[in-house]
Image (cartoon, helix red, strand yellow):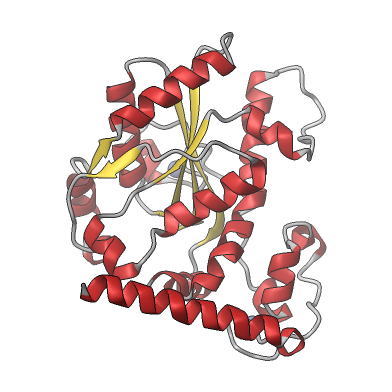
Amino acid sequence: MTDSLQAWLRRLQSAFATTAELLAPTSAACLLCGKPRTEARSPGSSNQSKLTPQLRKSLCGGCLSAIPWLTRIACPRCGRSIACEDCIRRPQRAFVCNRSAVSYNPAMRAMLALYKYRGNERLAPLLGDMLLPALEAMTCEVAQQLQDSATSGTFPKSVGKIADYWDAITYVPISPERASERGFNQAEQLASHLAHRYRLPLMNLLIRSRHSEKQSFKTRSERMRDTRTLFDVNARELRTLLNSATKAQPSRKTTRILLIDDIYTTGSTAEACSQELHRLAQCPLEIYILTWARS
Ligand SMILES: [Zn+2]
Ligand SMILES: [Zn+2]
């Protein structure tokens, strides 16, 4: 009762905040630093194209230019920008690869905390928009692998094309305890944002089988051990996906799933979810991980 009341109050607060913003559109403050938002300074030509109208109208020039976009990928498996010992140590993964939008630096940690722990849900569409370039680039990688003949290296920007490459988009679930405490699942909100933008089928493929302590308080080996039994597959939803994928793309030999989470740290969450999906599917799956930040 208390939990649902808190969640309801949070929704009401957020509705009031949105209304206040709509009534005073010209005095918008930066959603991150709170300073009056002036016309965005150019954050450097290479990253200019990543800034959607939503990002430009919500953040100040200083905050926009401080976004640590992950453009250089040094590890093709986990998408890290520096050489990666984890992937050398564990070359066998149940997922194809991870790509992330940004590096998880102190500024991004603060942004995620505002959204995830302080319940500022107005940041959800911003985090969602920040994932768009990473999803487009990852889809481009998939397209290039499929068509070796593709020489241009640029993916057609048409929205419909992105959807052609993915049979479903899904997300890492949170436990019911965490859901009632927070009022929302950040990974689900991000997945829903992308699904809406690119018309991808959003599916609830995974279930949190038990509650775990907050991951951030654990050591690397504790995390790896604990995540192994944390997820179950929503068998009915998976069956629906496999049936519809076969009908939609009869010539395709695998079903391609996009799995969304907020942060990629050791990859143990992505691995546990992917292993369960493979185990239940009993047919070829390609699971790609897309995360907002690479820690
Ligand atoms: Zn700012
Ligand atoms: Zn790696």
Q: Residue at x 78, y 38 (%)?
A: 158
174 vs 216, nearest the viewer: 174
x and y percentages locating residue 42 in the rendered image: 81, 72
Residue 119 visible (yes or no): no
Q: Answer above or below: position of 265 versus 26.
A: above
From the viewer's perspective, tell me whether residue 56 is left or right of residue 295: right
x and y percentages locating residue 254 in the rendered image: 49, 17
Residue 258 visible (yes or no): yes
Q: Answer above or below: position of 238 versus 75.
A: above
Q: Residue at x 28, y 43 (%)?
A: 207
Q: Residue at x 72, y 32 (%)?
A: 161
From the viewer's perspective, tell me whether residue 197 is left or right of residue 1: right
Q: Answer above or below: position of 288 versus 147.
A: below
**Which quarter of the picture shows residue 21?**
bottom right
Q: Residue at x 46, y 82 (%)?
A: 13
247 vs 107, nearest the viewer: 247
163 vs 142, nearest the viewer: 163
**Which quarter of the picture shows residue 175?**
bottom left
Point out the image quarter for the N terminus: bottom left
Residue farthest along the top direction in this orientation? 251
6 vs 36, nearest the viewer: 6
x and y percentages locating residue 125 in the rendered image: 59, 63
**Which quarter of the picture shows residue 64?**
bottom right
From the viewer's perspective, tell me whether residue 269 is left or right of residue 13: left
x and y percentages locating residue 104 in the rendered image: 48, 64
Ligand 1's image quarter is bottom right
Point out the image quarter for the C terminus: bottom left
